[in-house]
Image (cartoon, coloured by chain):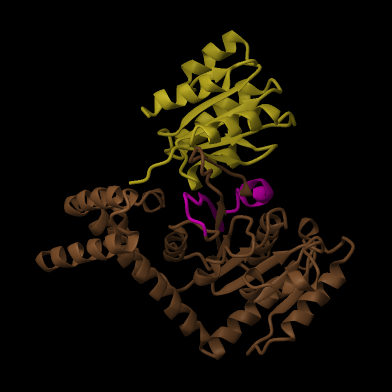
Amino acid sequence: MDKKLRILVAKPGLDGHDRGAKVVARALRDAGFEVIYTGLHQTPDMIVATAIQEDVNAVGLSILSGAHMTIFPNVMKLLKKKKAVDILLFGGGIIPDEDKKALYKLGVGKLFGPGTDTAEIVAYLKKYFKL
Amino acid sequence: MTLIENNDHKAKSILNTLYPRTGNAWRIGITGPPGAGKSTLVEKLAMECVKHNLSVGIVCIDPTSPFSGGAILGDRVRMSSLFLDPKVFIRSMATRGSLGGIAKATKQMCDLLDAFKKDIIIIETIGVGQVELDVAGIAFTTIVVLVPEAGDSIQTMKAGLMEIADIFVVNKSDRDGADKMVMEIQSILEMKDFDRIPVVLKTIGTEGKGVTDLYKSILEHKDYLKVTNKIKQRMQSTIQTEITEIVQEHIDKQVWRNPKIKLALNRFIDNIINGRQTPYHAADKIYAIWKKLGRKI
């Protein structure tokens, strides 16, 4: 078997700051993962449809617009609706600690803030998927 | 699809079960150099198919890094209008070491989409150079996408990529030199005897211009292959290649995983380095060992 970890990196909502998402995508590539990158302005429906068609292990969302309390729960809800709860949802952006806590309670995976070393994200995923 | 792509132990039985359901989809290959506009054209072509009430499966391939084994699969960036279309299914694949412009399991992915009753299957290769031509071996209609700046008549005369097209597309044709590029391609095609001269079309992918003509040309090519029964030849050669590859894989496994051969190989390598043997002697001996073992299996 030649298994590879497949990660969807998506940029939901209206903000166009995709530098962070691209840096993370690149770092995951260099860690040996297959990264599906979909570009800007993705809706939760688009993200979940893509995650299922591509059969990814994890979805990473980059949100810098402040819409994290809407988008993360919506994606989570849709993943549940589509019976795709085996897919890890994690992310990054400017997310206050109390919001992080609320999202963790919903079952969202780790949320990374500005200035995170990409190695930390890679290490988190490797640990989560026992690589 | 993941099990097939990962060559899981269940893959063979899944393919054996689903194979009898294949044979209905028309398989279109889209290839060309990086940045020619393949993904954008695929999006527009898929939209055209959906407009004609056809369901579409897309397999898009991007390269695996030879250093990290990772990949950025970014073809979807140009296809977002298709994400929520229930008639369209998109699957991205990394080459995982294959050098022919597609992945090893791309043909099998197409078989699955075919079995899932997609009417049209579009295979988008990685951005190719001149010799990554494997897609022509699994597609019924191969489209080569070029841009106006793709070169003069010497470039279009070269072997490889320019020989596999059933349809040529000069994309980004709002740029200078598009008509000249079309003429360069046509003048090369005139030098050779074809049963059917490949069509040369102009498109502007981002605006969807020329895509209806492209769709029509694909249908014409399909009719041509069916009427002349050339489709049978294409299928024969695809199946032959597939069987050859599977047998090759079996043999490779049997040979290189055999402990006796592994041992001999290591000994021969030392011998060769020390100047006592040549690689050709060693290969003959390994073949002889395998043949002897083969009788017992």
Q: Which residue is drawn at the image coordinates 32% and 61% (left, top)?
A: B249
* Residue A21 image position (x, y, % from top left): 64, 30
In-front residue for pair B42/A125: A125
Q: Which residue is drawn at the image coordinates 40% and 34% (left, top)?
A: A86
Is residue B82 covered in magenta? yes
- Residue A25, compared with residue A63, is above or below; it is below
Q: Which residue is drawn at the image coordinates 32% and 55% (left, top)?
A: B11
Residue B213 visible? The answer is: no
**In-image side of B286 versus A54 (left or right):** left
**Image quadrant where residue B116 sits:** bottom left
**Image quadrant where residue B285 sits:** bottom left
Q: Chain B is drawn in which colour?
A: brown
In the image, which residues are magenta? B76-99
Which residue in the rendered view is the most extreme toward the left? B296
**In-image side of B270 versus B143 (left or right):** left
**Image quadrant where residue A98 sits:** top right
Q: Colour of chain A?
A: yellow
Q: Which residue is drawn at the image coordinates 46% and 84% (left, top)?
A: B232
Residue A100 visible? The answer is: yes
